[in-house]
Image: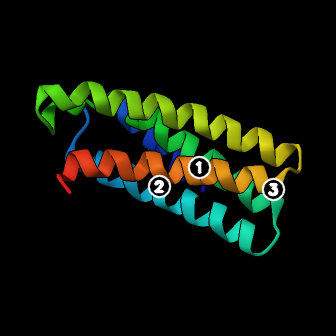
Amino acid sequence: MKKVILALVACSALTFASETTIDATMKLMKQGMDQIQSGFMYNSKDDIKRGIETVQNADAIFKHVKVSEFMKSQKTTVAKNINKNLSKDLKALQKAVESSKYSDATKEYGKVLNDCLSCHTIIRGW
C-alpha cells in the first residue's frame, strides 16, 4: 500500500495532472474513507489511522491537480477552499482518534465525508 502511495506521489510530482492521476487519487481517497469507516465498525484504531493516512496522502497528491482544467474558473476557488477544509478536518479526525474520543471522531469523519461530497457536487454538477 505504501508503495502505491509513494508511486502516486512521485507520478504527480513529475507530471502534470492527467485524468489517470485524478482517477487514481480519487480511488485512493475512497480506499482511505472505506478503511476509516471499517475501523469504526470493527473498533480498530489502527485501521482508522491507516485510512486517515491514506486520505491525507491522496489529498497531498490532489493539491497538485490544476482544478481549473476540470471546471469553470468561478468554482475553482470553492474547490480549493474545500480542499483546505479537508486537510483541516482530517487533522481534527486524527486528533480525536489519537485521544480515543470516538464520538468526536465520528463527527469529524462526517465533516470529511461532507468535504468529499461538496467537491463532487461542484465538479460533477450534482
Picture quadrant of residue 24: bottom left
Residue 22 versus residue 34: which sits nearer the camera? 34
Amino acid carrying label 3: it is Tyr
For residue 74, above or below residue 18: above
Q: Secondary structure at mark 1?
A: helix
Applied colour scheme: rainbow
Q: Which mark is residue 28?
A: 2
For residue 89, above or below residue 49: above
Quarter in which the C terminus is drawn: bottom left
How many numbered dots are placed on residues in this image? 3
Near mark 2 (Cα within 10 A), the count class, few <14, some 14-19 or many ≥20, is many
Residue at coordinates 39% horizontally, 37% vertically from top-left?
Answer: 62
Q: Earlier in the sequence, mark 1 or mark 3?
A: 1
Report the Cα–Cα distance between label 1 and label 2.
Answer: 7 Å
Rendered location of residue 108, percent (x, y): 65, 47
Q: Secondary structure at mark 2?
A: helix
Nearer to us of marks 1 and 3 is 3
Amino acid carrying label 2: it is Leu
Residue 24 versus residue 69: which sits nearer the camera? 69
Amino acid carrying label 1: it is Thr
Nearer to us of marks 3 and 2 is 3
According to the image, label 3 marks what residue? 102
Give yes or no for contact between labels 3 and 2 (Cβ–Cβ under 8 Å). Answer: no
Report the Cα–Cα distance between label 1 and label 3.
Answer: 19 Å
Rendered location of residue 46, percent (x, y): 80, 58
Near mark 1 (Cα within 10 A), the count class, few <14, some 14-19 or many ≥20, is many
Give yes or no for contact between labels 1 and 2 (Cβ–Cβ under 8 Å). Answer: yes
Near mark 3 (Cα within 10 A), the count class, few <14, some 14-19 or many ≥20, is some
Image position of 52 (left or right of 125): right
For residue 95, above or below residue 63: below
Rendered location of residue 121, percent (x, y): 27, 51
According to the image, label 1 marks what residue? 54
